[in-house]
Image (cartoon, rainbow, N blue to C red):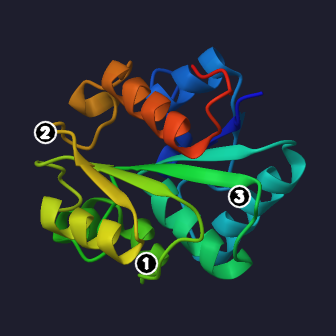
Amino acid sequence: MPPQIVIVPGLGDSGPEHWQTLWERKYGAARVRQDDPENPTPATWAERLNEIIEATPGELVLVAHSCGVPTVVHWARFYGANERVKGALLVAPPDMDHPTLRQQHPAAAQMAPVPLSPLPFPALVVASENDPYASLDRAQQFARAWDAEFISAGEAGHINIASGHGDWPDGEVLLSEALHAWTPPDIVRI
């Protein structure tokens, strides 16, 4: 049986046409729903992620976008390794020190500082060359600190609806490749 996907949205809970929501429906994924999706705090958002991890049976792969990425990283710091988490796809990690992020989404700065310790599971960081909330160099620094693989999505903005990524087929390819790398060869994959 393939791992269960757990969607970890960022600010605003990734709307109905966001690729995370489309993947949730397509793959029957579990989803982290924060009580206040506009007000992220490390402890509160990590706690909700932990509740979903504990409530979702089987092996898991976390799929995080934007502020969902530091949520996963803070969760790993607060809760440590969970052998059922087989990996994480971390898309468009925001830089909490980036001036555009601080100006447009000041509440997101509450997620700072983002831990820079190796993650206790395999991870793939996907970032854009023109993300308004993080430079490519900063995203690469995150990947190195987290001991994660890194892939540039090219000039893809914030890899969200505003940048034309409602449906994100290239992301599904990356998810499939990550699942292949993180699961035994006899598992049926997407």
In space, the residues marked 2 and 3 are separated at their CA atoms by 29 Å
Which residue in the structure is indicated by mark 3? 49
Task: Determine the residue positioned at 45% across, 27% down.
Answer: 19
Between the residue at mark 3 and the residue at mark 1, the CA separation in whole angstroms equals 16 Å
Label disc, if present, on residue 154 of the rendered structure: 2
Contact, mark 1 vs mark 2 (Cβ under 8 Å)? no
Neighbourhood count class around disc 3 (C-alpha, 10 Å): few under 14, some 14–19, many 20 upward: many
Q: Amino acid at mark 2?
A: Gly
Q: Earlier in the sequence, mark 1 or mark 2?
A: 1
Q: Secondary structure beneath disc 2?
A: loop
Tag 3: residue type? Answer: Leu
| Residue 100 horizontal/vertical position (percent) | 19, 63
Which badge, 3 or 1, is on the more N-terminal residue? 3
Task: Give the residue drawn at x 41%, y 81%.
Answer: 116
Do labels 2 and 3 touch, CB within 8 Å? Answer: no
Indicate the quadrant where residue 93 lies: bottom left
Q: Secondary structure at mark 1?
A: loop
Q: Which quadrant holds the N terminus?
A: top right
Give the amino acid at mark 1.
Val
Identified at 18% across, 71% down, the residue is: 99
Measure the C-alpha gap from mark 1 to mark 2.
Answer: 24 Å
- Quadrant where the C terminus lies? top right
The numbered mark, 2 or 3, whose residue comes first in the sequence reads: 3
Q: Position of residue 4 (x, y in %)?
A: 72, 35
Residue to which mark 1 is pinned = 114
Q: Please state if 135 lies on the left or on the right of 65 as rendered.
A: left
With 140 as the anchor, is 114 left or right in this view?
A: right
In-front residue for pair 105/24 = 24
Question: In this rendering, does residue 187 appear at all?
Answer: yes
Residue at x 51% of width, y 32% of height? 20
